[in-house]
Image (cartoon, rainbow, N blue to C red):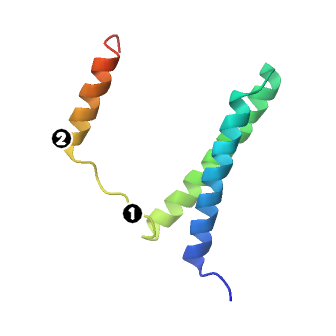
Amino acid sequence: MSMQEKEVFDDVLTSQKFITDTYNTYTNECATPNIRDEFLNILTEEHQIQADVFDEMKKRGWYTTPQAEQQKIQQAKQKYQNENPQG
């Protein structure tokens, strides 16, 4: 039994989320700047792959994201402005 195209995209997106999470951990734990920089490059590439998969799924209607309510946006802005009064 083969996977349908949407299921393949779901699997790829889930895998990319796991990969970026793992590379983020590796990047945070690097002992030298050179290795950290290389992991940051890989992490950026993996995030781009994840974004590409997400964008394609959204374009096909397989991943919908609701628009944020203006009131919730204002509440979030207020919360973070209060936590960081200098910013």
Residue displayed at 64% across by 81% down:
3
Q: Secondary structure at mark 2?
A: helix
Q: Residue furthest top?
A: 86
| Residue 38: percent from left, percent from top | 78, 32
x%, y% of residue 49?
A: 64, 53
Residue 75: name its quadrant: top left
- Local packing at callout 1 (Cα closer than 10 Å; few below 14, some 14-19, many 20+) is few
Q: CA distance from mark 1 to mark 2?
A: 21 Å
Q: Quadrant of residue 9?
A: bottom right
- Is residue 74 left or right of 27 when viewed as pictured? left
Pointers 1 and 2 in contact (C-beta within 8 Å): no
Quadrant location of the N terminus in the rendered image: bottom right
Q: Amino acid at mark 2?
A: Gln
Left or right placement of residue 53 versus residue 62 in this view = right
Residue 8: % across, % down:
62, 72
Q: Give the residue displayed 69% in from the left and 43% down from the top.
A: 22
6 or 25, which lies in front?
25
Residue at x 46%, y 71% (from the top left corner): 60
Q: On the image, numbered disc 1 is attached to which residue?
A: 64
Return the residue at label 2: 71
Mark 1 or mark 2: whose residue is earlier in sequence: 1
Q: Is residue 24 left or right of residue 69?
A: right
In the picture, the quarter occupied by the C terminus is top left
Classed neighbour count for the residue bearing mark 2: other residues with Cα under 10 Å, few (<14), some (14–19), many (≥20): few
Image height of 41 relative to 31, above or below? below
Q: Amino acid under label 1? A: Thr
Q: Which mark is residue 36?
A: none
The residue lying at 81 percent from left, 23 percent from top is 34
- The secondary element bearing badge 1 is classed as loop
Q: How far across and down, in percent of the image, does residue 76 sit?
A: 28, 33
